[in-house]
Amino acid sequence: MVLRLGEMLVQSNVITSDQLEEALKTQVMFGGKLGTNLVELNFVDEQTIANTLSKKLGVPSVSRDDLMAIPESTISILSKNVVEKYKVVPISVDKSGLTIVTADPSNLNSFDELRFITSKAIKTVIAPEIDLILAMERYYDIPRDVRYIHMMERGEKGQNGGKGAEPSKTKEKSSIPEMTDFIDFNKDAIPEAVSDSSRPEPHFELENAIKEYSVDELYLKLADSKNRDEMSACITDYLGPQFKKTLFVIIKGQFAIGWTGTSDHEHIANVSQFKVPLNEPSVFSTVVDEKKYYLGPPLNTPGNIIILKTMGDTKPPPLVLVVPIIMKEKVVCAIYLEEGQLSLKDEVLRIQKLAQKISIAFEMLVLRNKLLLT
C-alpha cells in the first residue's frame, strides 16, 4: 500500500490529523502540492517535508544551494516545455543516467515518459516545491505563481529575524497603478437606471448557446470535477459567452488573486499573476468585508483600477456585479462580471445560486481529496 505524504507526516508526528484536514481544504481552494499548503498554513517548513519524504521513500534530498548551481550543460538537456509539463529540473548527468529534481518522487509514470524522451535512465532527488519552482524560474524563465512569490518573501523575512518585515514605501507605490494615466471617474456615482429601450435586442445565437449549456449541465460538470482546474474551466465556459468580462478570484490572506477569466469572450492571459490587496478599497474588499454581493459602478480607487486594467477596460463600466462564494461563513472566492448581452440587474439571483453551488462543489472536492490523499 502506498503511504501518502499526509499520512507520513502524521505518523512521524510532524503534523496532527486536524492540521492535515485543514491543509486538504486549502489544497482544493488554492491548488499546489499538499506540502505547499501545509507550509503556507505554518504547520511545517519546506525542508522538514523534503526530509520526511527522503527518509520514508529512501530518495535523497537536495538543498536550495545545489539547485541554484546547476551547470548550463545539464539544464539544456530538458526543454522548457518538458520542465513545465513534468515539474522537474535536471541536476546532474553521467554515464549511469540523468538525475532530476522533483517534489513528487511517487510520480512514476512521468519518470517513465522522461526516460523515453531523453533515452536515459532516470534517477530522482527530492526538493521542496517552492525550491523547485524557484529553479524553474531561474533556468527556464517559467514565472512563479503569485502564491510562491509570497512564500519566498515570507521565508526571507523569517531568515532575517523579522528585519524588513515592513515593505518599503517604494515597493508599495510601485504596486499600485498611477491614477494620472487612467480615466478619472466620479467616486460618488450611482448606477444609472437602464431602460428597456436602451437594452440590446435579444441575441438569439447567444440564447441558443446558453440553452445548449444549461445550468443543469453546469451543475453536473461541477459535481464531476476532479480538481480546481476542471471546476474553473466549466464555470468559465458557462459564464464567458454571457457576459462581456468575467473574473473568478480566490481570496487568500490579504489578497484577491486571479484564477480564471475572460475579456470579450477570450481567456485572459496570465490571470494567475493578477492580485489586488484587500486592505485597499475595491469591489473585492467590499464583498469580502460585507459578505454580500456588490452591484454598482467601480469607484475611483487604486484597487479597482488594477481590476479594470486587467480586464482591458479603457474606461470604467457603468455597472459591475461581484458575488462572493462563502464556505463556513468565510469568503473564499468571488465572481466578477461586467454587463454583456445579459442585464446584470436581472442576473443577481442566478449568479448567487451559482455561487452557492460552487461552494458545495468545493466541499465535495475536499471530501474527495480526503478520501484519496489520506
Image (cartoon, rainbow, N blue to C red):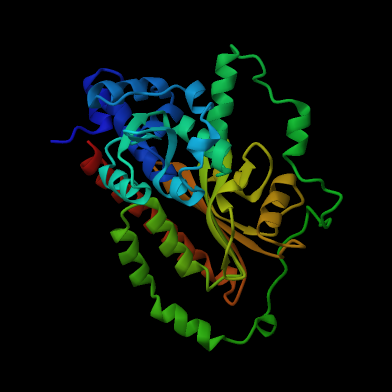
From the top left corner, tell me how far across and down residue 190 is, in percent. Answer: 73, 60
From the top left corner, tell me how far across and down residue 258 is, in percent. Answer: 55, 50
Query: Residue at the left extreme?
Result: 1
Left or right, 96 with respect to 131, comes to: left
From the top left corner, tell me how far across and down residue 357 is, in percent. Answer: 37, 58
Instruction: Specify the quadrant of the image occupied by residue 212.
Output: bottom left
Q: Residue at the location (44% across, 21% down)?
A: 63
From the top left corner, tell me how far across and down residue 119 is, in percent. Answer: 33, 47
Is 24 situated above or below 316?
Answer: above
Depth order, front residue of 218/202: 218
Q: Residue at the location (34% across, 71% down)?
A: 217
Q: Is residue 369 visible?
A: yes
Q: Quadrant of the C terminus?
A: top left
Q: Quadrant of the N terminus?
A: top left
Query: Residue at the front extreme?
Result: 95
Depth order, front residue of 209/273: 273
- The tally of labels here is 0
Depth order, front residue of 97/138: 97
Query: Residue at the top extreme?
Result: 161
